[in-house]
Image (cartoon, helix red, strand yellow):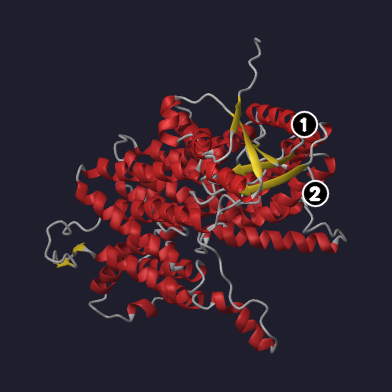
Amino acid sequence: MIGLSVFGDLLHGFGTVLDPMNLLWAILGVTLGMLVGILPGIGPALTIALLLPITFNFSDPIGAFILFAGIYYGAMYGGSTTSILINTPGESASVATAIEGHKMALKGRARAALATAAIGSFVAGTISTVLLTFVAKPIGSLASHFQATDYFAITLLAMVAVTALVGHSLVRGLLSLVVGLFIGLIGLDSLSGAPRYTFGTLRLLDGIDVVIVIVGLFAIGETLHVASKLRSTPERPAVLEKGRLRTGYLNKSDWGRSWKPWLRGTALGFPFGAIPSGGAEVPTFLSYSIERRQARKKGRDEFGDGAIEGVAGPEAANNASFSGVLVPLLTLGLPTSATAAVMLAAFQIFNVQPGPQLFEDQSTLVWTLIASLYIGNLILLIMNLPLIQIWVQVLKVPRPLLYAGILVFACLGVYSLSGSGYEVLMALVIGVAGFFMRKLDFPIAPVILGVILGPTMEEQFRRALVISNGDASVFVTRPLSAVIIVLTVLALFVPYLPRIVARIRGTRPTRDRLTFGEDD
Amino acid sequence: MKILVGYVPTPEGEAALTAAAAEAELRGASILLLNTSRGDAYIDARYANADELAAAEAKLREHGVEVTIQQAVSEGDVAGALLKAAAAEDVGLIVLGLRRRSPVGKLILGSTAQRVLLESPVPVLAVKVPSPHD
């Protein structure tokens, strides 16, 4: 009985997560996530990157993962707050929310918008966690039939698909990916023991620690990037009308108009999180346009003027996508967004190998993590609305102080890892490189995917060749691998779909190319 | 002649506004109200919203004083913005609200009031919030 064993495992997970210490990690995680979600420019990837070095000292990885997961979906809750109140999306996943949410706030319905976002996030988070609970193990056992060639193909698919979808230019994305793959190659060759790209120094023999790359790119590079915009675009501080927060929560018609978008958003978010499409941005915009179409069908023309459906749908979608992201991450060890890639690095640090064996080898860890999602969603729902005035306080922190603090903390974290200035310097160099990449519009996510997945891909590639006695055709003769490789090639064309469709129809393209901003 | 008042929607700002209104009435001067923010945080309570500016304006008009309102982000230099506004217009007096600051806070962040007091070419009237015990 698969169903029963899932319940048994899950109950066991709840038992572990309700341990006071783990509960504390969950509360800390969602609170931090909420705060960084609110702060524009500071996302979950940056926060997890900052905390990664600290969790090295954890004796028990479970706490670290509860913390990280809390940050990830806490940020999804928090992102809506600034979207609605000051029209500045806290995360890329909340950009769609800002369109209708801020309009609602201007009409004095901020509370209703915040409420539909929070309750929708809770509904979506819970439903999608239930889906995750039942889907993860079967997919895991399916994946246990995977062979080296399939792993190679699927890793390639993840890297290429995410690269194709984030950022504004495919060529730049692929260049970023190559940089990541290169960094991943530095060090001793795992098979032959030959040093690669070490430039004759002993320092580089161990390769560049993935944590240093992550802290450098996400914490230092991103912070430099947002800080550099402080002077060039002096923003007028948003005026937060006090009256905006006084009007009531959801009334009856709001509930009636919200629940369907919540469910539709969940249905979009979960599968899109699970496929390599860079996380939550695609499903939120899809949800937004579906809700708009639905409203037009019903003859409601409120969209563009503060329609509650336009907040309910995308917010549900971004939370559901998080559980979706966990499916390939836990069952295949495959990150589909930058934050997931950072989490995968955390798994590797603790010597936990995500993949088909995870549910057998690390049953407690996985089920505690899943149980913590249920608990965390509940905590967020309880904390979110009543404490909104407190959350908004973080927006009053002068940004120069904030960014300086992050940089200090990042350097401190790297130093605490190794106790050597060399690593700190390395992180700073990578950070400055990351800053220029952002400045020149190169996406960061492909670099991280390259660094983390590159070595895995290489290992599987060579293992496959060893098994086939050096015959490279194995990658196309095994049907599963061949299908995945074809999908990989197709993924490269997805961004150009509008143009291709337009050419076939013989019309002018409305949008030159599908682009999705940098994912968090 | 104009009187420049640095206004923020806090008790200090209200005190400055009251003093400026009285002074303007006395001298028959008009008032230039400047509200500014360092602009380095996403939300700044000292950046007045429309209601607060309207209330300030109404308060001055009650005293029968002509008022011009300027609002701008001063990119980290509030004192500079005040001094610039004073130089640009025919300003004969600057009115400021003072608040208590810790020595450390002043050391790190500096003091807007102190800079205006020291660098202003025209007299500066600095007022405190009346203590509730008086």
Amino acid identity at mark 2: Arg
Asked if labels 1 and 2 share a chain, the reply is: no
Judge by depth and name the residue closer to the eye, A196 or B92.
Answer: B92
Total number of numbered discs in the rendering: 2
Answer above or below: position of A437 versus A125.
below
* Secondary element at tag 2: helix
Q: Nearer the viewer, mark 1 or mark 2?
A: 1
Q: Residues within 10 Å of mark 2 (few under 14, many from 20)?
A: some
The N terminus of chain B: image quadrant: top right
The one nearer the camera, A215 or B21, is B21
Percent across and percent down for residue A33 are 51, 41
Whether residue A56 appears in this view of the structure is yes
Q: Judge whether residue A126 can be spotted in this image.
A: no
- The residue that disc 1 covers is B25
- Residue at 45% x, 42% y: name it: A402
The chain identifier of the residue carrying mark 2 reads A
Report the side of A10 relative to A450 (left or right). Answer: right
Q: Residue furthest bottom?
A: A506
Left or right: residue A4 versus residue B131 is left
Q: Is residue A162 left or right of residue A191?
A: right
Question: Dot 1, how many residues are within 10 Å of its Cα: few (below 14), some (14-19), or many (20+)?
Answer: some
Q: Which secondary structure lies at badge 1?
A: helix
Q: Is residue A245 above or below residue A448?
A: above
Q: Which amino acid is tagged 1?
A: Glu
Residue holding disc 2: A257
Q: Are marks 1 and 2 in contact (CB under 8 Å)?
A: no
Q: Which mark is residue B48?
A: none
**Mark 1 vs mark 2, CA separation in Å:** 56 Å
Residue at 58% from the left image edge and 72% from the top image edge: A514
Residue A192 screen position, x and y as percent: 15, 66
Q: Nearer the viewer, residue A418 or B60?
A: B60
